[in-house]
Amino acid sequence: MPATVDAEGFLTDPAQWDEGLAEEIAHENGIPELTPRHWQVLRYMRETYLTTGSAPTIRTLGKASGVPIKELYELFPKGPAKLAAKVAGIPKPRGCI
Amino acid sequence: MSRVVILGGGTGGTLMANRLRRRTDPAEVRITVVDQDDRHVYQPGLLFVPFGLMEPGELVRPRHRQLRPGVAFLRSAVDRVALEDRAVHLADGTLLPYDVLVVASGADLRPEETEGLTGPGWGERTFTFYSVEGATALARALGAFDGGRLVVDLVDMPIKCPVAPLEFAFLADWHLTRRGIRRRTEITYVTPLDSAFTKPTCARALSGLLTRKGVRLVTEFNAGEVDGRAGTLTSYDGRTVPFDLLVSVPLHAGAPFVGRSEGLGDELDFVRVDPATLQSRARPEVFAIGDATDVPTSKAGSVAHFQGEVLTENVLRFLDGRPLEPGYDGHANCFIETGHRKALLIDFNYDVEPLPGRFPGPVGPLPLLRESRLNHAGKLAFTWMYWNVLLPGRDMPGIDARMSMAGKRPLAPAGA
């Protein structure tokens, strides 16, 4: 079954995600290859979202994923929290409105 | 005799203590509220202080006076909770054993986590209105402000009252217009999120608001460093926003004692709980309420109020040995000031985004997701409701803990 995405390309159902899909989303968004450091961030993102219901913010990632903030920008250019969420197949970080 | 200990005498702790006291016999359940000070701040009022619309003095009342007779108030800082021993270690070394613990210690500001923010210029050129002291200092600075670049920066989510920074920008627009210096002022709203309105329903209904008020928007900006002398805000990816006056909403985190209590909190010291029962993921006899939790809804007084109804039931069930009720649905309800004596109203939960329509209530239907004077009146009336209905732990007439779809107009899903 093809994965369904919202208007911005985020998966609407995190359960449709798998590692192959992550590679595809990464390519489409300008990340040529997912390295073990990318995977470290992606696994942390998914685990956090699936247990708490919120996507971690950049500061939480910097504190808890084991990858410092500067490197997060190298791995996931421009908006690491948003791009990593997209590749990890979870909704983007949002405010209340 | 069961011992219920509540850590924190703010919105959540106070209303929990009062609700539990009304539902239990003092001969059977002892309720103790612990807080490090006796100043209860009406936090929604802080937004108005910088503009002279509320005085700092009107926002503060003694914590112990908000508690019903039969609730003990213990003034002490907390060192940590020993979950295995079911005891709170107070700062002076005293042990406070409990049968049920409710963590209601809110969210703290951590401005020192942003490099340079508390350095030169803090309280002179760089401010926060998220504390009584900060809001008071900002009122002075804004009074002396004669135009220039006013920057509102939200460092990172989650924050208390997530719309307050946006409300600040709207009120600043109004305030500066009235003083005749709006044309000499550039207002910029800087956010780490990808837009000011991140939910599709809000983006559609409110997208014109910033343009209409002439507020510039900088998105996906993660503030890494502040230079109060040079007047610059720099992001982790090297972008710079210059300012003459910076209004910062610093990083938030749970109470430091949560971090010292092994197993209780997450990386930011928010208490890990089940989002529907509010029971700790670490221990069955531990619960949390309000800003102190890690649940994926807004940190807001309305949330603590709605959670209070569910959590009271669950604490009673736990004491009786009955199964908990997964009754909390993420319900939040907020007025959003937009200036010129108008406000918006939003009502949502974990699953339903803020929708347009009309919100049925005790004073008649209020427009949802649309600016109106009625909503502004509602926001001002809320001050009285806070001290006299919400803190005493009474239900708001006609407003249920669970979100209702009555009056809401569902929208077609985005992209459909």
Image: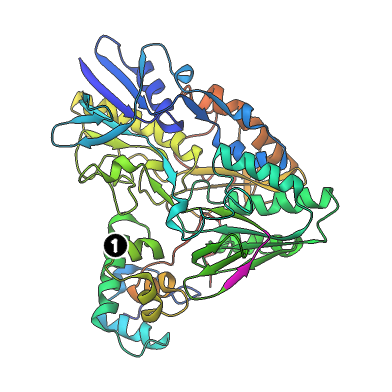
Residue A50 x %, y %: 29, 60
Residue A97: image x %, image y %?
Answer: 55, 56
> Which residue range is magenta in the image?
B240-244
Closer-to-camera residue (B117/B270): B117
Q: Residues within 10 Å of mark 1 (few under 14, many from 20)?
A: some
Q: At 52% across and 33% down in the image, what residue appears?
A: B399
Query: For residue B84, which quarter of the picture?
Result: top left
Q: Residue at x 58, y 43 (%)?
A: B134
Which quadrant, please, contains the N terminus of chain B? top left
Q: Is residue B38 left or right of residue B90?
A: right
Q: Dominant secondary structure of the magenta stretch? A: strand
Report which residue position mark 1 lands on.
A64
Q: Is residue B30 visible?
A: yes
State yes or no: residue A46 in magenta.
no
Residue lying farthest to the top in this orientation: B27
* Displayed quadrant of residue B88: top left
Residue B263 position within the rendered picture, expressed as x and y whole percent measured from the top left = 20, 46
Q: Nearer the viewer, residue B315 or B358?
A: B315
Question: Dot 1 falls on which chain?
Answer: A
